[in-house]
Amino acid sequence: MARLHNMTQAGGASARLLTLLFACLLLALVPLRAGADEALLPHFLAEVAAADLVSGADAFGPPRADHPVAPVLRAGETIGWAFITSDFVGTTGYSGKPIHVLVAVGDDAKIIGLKLVKHSEPIVLIGIPQAKIEAMMADYVGLDLVAAAAGAEHDLKIISGATVTVMVIDDSILRSGLRVARALGLGGLATEAAAPAGPAYAINPEATAPHDWQALLGDGTLRRLSLDVAQINATFAADPDPRAAARALTDPPETTFIDMYTTLVSIPGIADAMLDGRETETLRQWLAADRRGAPQGDAENDDDPDAGKSDPRAHAILVVARGLYSFKGSGYVRGGIFDRIQLIQGDLSVRFHDRDHRRLGEVGASGAPALSEMDLFRIPADSGFDPTQPWRLQLLVSRDVAAREKAFTTFDLDWRPPAQFLRALAPAAPAATPTASVDDAEDAAKAALWQRIWQSKRVEIAAVSVMLAVLTAAFFFQGFITRSARFTFWFRISFLTITLVYLGWYANAQLSIVNLMALTGALITGFSWDAFLMDPLTFILWFSVAAALLFWGRGAYCGWLCPFGALQELTNRIAKFFHVPQWTLPWGLHERLWAVKYMIFLGLFGVTLMSIEQAEHLAEVEPFKTAIVLKFARAWPFTLYALVLLGIGLFVERFYCRYLCPLGAALAIPARMRMFDWLKRYHECGKPCQTCANECPVQAIHPTGEINPNECVNCMNCQVLYQSKTKCPVIIRQLKRRASVAPPTPQP
């Protein structure tokens, strides 16, 4: 026993030394930064044939001196311009590195060719075939960047298991394409140098509008779009799809299809004319509540005559209509977005969500017609909308042409502020501070991308948050939970099932050693939170793991939140149900096999310092991608490897977790610094009682009674035994002692 105790002390000292060494290596990496990269275009042009990028092209011309773009040539004539997305935008993928796509754009600002030339995405390198990514990218050929600049949306084909990668590619192609198109003036887009310095007018808050409906129409304060059935049928008759004309409306041709009106009611004079006093005050409070992005102090500047120009508070439009067609539709009820209308101002496009919508009881202007729809839509303060500039409300009209197919057309309702609501500004003095730099714009675009991803994952984020809250409560009140062995068993089985099915197979939220490799790469090349925020579930799980390491060690994740660990334990439980024999390795062999996972981890970490790409290939020692992310839909060697590990786990519970998992080893090293010891023990544990040690599912309890926190998965089995009245000798002895001193029960 003394020898084993000494070995334990030596093992603890070695672990502390390993922790210190690992921390020093990470600290040494932090100051390393990559220098500014030169344009990547010349390098990739030398590796890609022009015909592989654009069909019929035969050569590339020399790159331009002012921008990293090169002409795409056919018989000596320029048919487009080629560029690398990463030369213009810095969006990084899941690996923390840019995804380099070679793109060609024609003079009409339409994409004419794309090619994925380099990436470091681990899920594509060793999981999803690159052919799937390339097939997805082929859909971008023909994409009109002019329409994209105006806010037109396109179908984005998400590939299961590569959501982040696909969204990063989409963001990189669109933003870099728009930058190139503007820089070269393609498709009529204004060049960046020609962009106006700012509006020449401000809203005049003292201007008034007539309170009569016809007068408002006459001076342009209120604008109208009126369409009848004949116009709609004629529009769809010109659709390339003959099925659109075949399904013409059968109402009389003069029937009003839609009679729609709009105006900007955030201008005080227009609000007074269109709304009654109560609605005007409600509108003011509603707009003041949305100050996303407003500089501190601007919210109190209500009396500033330049408020319409300088105060970035929200604005609002009034949209009212009557007729057969609803400009709201019903889609917003399900998805929270009004998909039939959008506001467009230059390159700005605003789609309205249900949170930015209010119904209007009645219109205040006299002489208004009977209206079936009356609504207010708020333009968010951070949208960049300028109330002094013209804008248009675009109406989308659809017609069913098949069971699941529709034809679409759009109509524009233009609006510009009447002259009486504008006042000219004196020429602005030269700015004392520089305008926002390109880097600031790039940072804002990256932030917008990960925020969009988080918005799309709201349900999954809520579900994971609930799981973490339940698990945290279970750990804090484990003494109460473990009073019942039956309850503890079913609680654990239920939680592991949710972890496997929902967290793993559905949400693909399986942490991996690859995540730590990406962190190492980020520390070497320049750390940025953007790359890690791209996958919200992974980010939340890593944040929770970091917190749990300080409280409970690695067991909080490895024992409860790891989908592959859950798969191992659940399959082992099934094996036990069918009486599959369980193998218990001799303690000496078992203790020495612990070191294997640490050697695997240190080996991968060392390779990462030399080549992250090579380390990502070697990280296939983890079967996570095969069994969880790709659900065994891989080449047979990967599938066989995962099945072999699970097969051994039928006889040795959590075999992979115990001896091979580099992620578990990586988590065990900092777990030595945990602040609390939550697992209760008696002095008699291990001396002589061996009940907990013999029943520990992963043999994490030394024969001397100590629990090894590096190997414990916090399954709570030992805490159930700690309170067991039938298995724990200490509890049994206490119960006997109490029974012996209790007064005898009186006889009747």
Image (cartoon, rainbow, N blue to C red):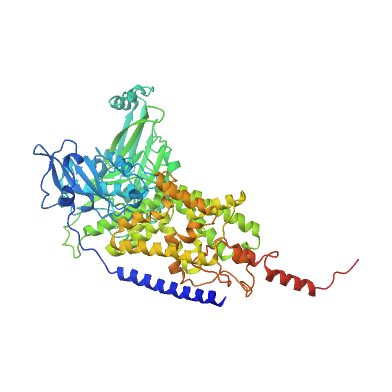
Say whether residue 13 is left or right of residue 341. right
**Could you say which is closer to the camera, residue 51 or residue 478?**
51
Corner quadrant of residue 317? top left
Q: Position of residue 236 (x, y in %)?
A: 31, 27
Residue 354 x %, y %: 42, 46
Q: Viewer-proximal residue, 670 or 240?
A: 670
Observer-nearest of 112 and 274: 112
- Residue 287, image x, y percentages: 37, 53
Is residue 543 among what the camera can see? Answer: yes
* Image location (x, y in percent) of residue 107: 16, 40
Q: Residue lying furthest right in this view?
A: 748
Residue 601 sits in quarter = bottom left
Give the quadrant of the N terminus.
Answer: bottom right
Q: Which of 199 and 517 is in front in this view?
A: 517
Q: Is residue 189 left or right of 154 when viewed as pictured?
A: left
Work out whether residue 153 can be spotted.
Answer: no
Vertically, is 197 above or below 153?
below
Residue 412 versus residue 570 in the image, above or below: above
Q: Residue 243, located in which quarter of the rendered image?
A: top left
